[in-house]
Image (cartoon, helix red, strand yellow):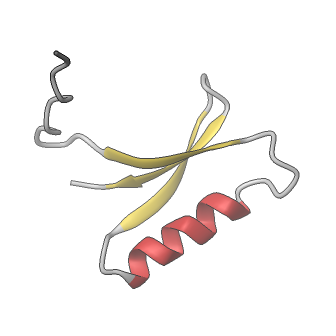
Amino acid sequence: MSTPPPAPGPGQRTVLERFPAGSPRGSWPAEEYAAGQRDQGIDAHVVMDLPADQFLVITRP
């Protein structure tokens, strides 16, 4: 039986979605997803995870 990931603590961010940085559209898919989340009242932002070469849509604490 697997255990759920721990809840984020103070100062930690929650990753809502990941998008490959090598996409032909660049960060647009991540920006569009974040905008949709903000439309639903979720404070979503796009950041770049350089080691993973991905755009992350996150919520801030």
Q: Position of residue 16 (x, y in %)?
A: 40, 51
18, 11: nearer the viewer: 18
> Going by the picture, which residue comes out furthest to the right?
24
Q: Residue at x 81, y 39 (%)?
A: 22
Left or right position of 17 against 54: left
Left or right position of 27 against 56: right
> Going by the picture, which residue comes out furthest to the bottom?
39
Q: Is residue 51 above or below residue 20?
A: above
Q: Quadrant of residue 1?
A: top left
24, 10: nearer the viewer: 24
Image quarter (top left, top right, bottom left or bottom right) of the C terminus? bottom left
Q: Position of residue 36 (x, y in %)?
A: 49, 76
Q: Quadrant of residue 59?
A: bottom left
Q: How many marks?
A: 0
> Going by the picture, which residue comes out furthest to the top?
1
Q: Position of residue 49 (x, y in %)?
A: 56, 35
Q: Residue at x 42, y 72 (%)?
A: 37
Left or right position of 61 against 38: left
Q: Residue at x 31, y 71 (%)?
A: 42
Q: Is residue 58 above or below residue 6?
A: below
Q: Position of residue 27 (x, y in %)?
A: 70, 56
Left or right position of 38 against 24: left
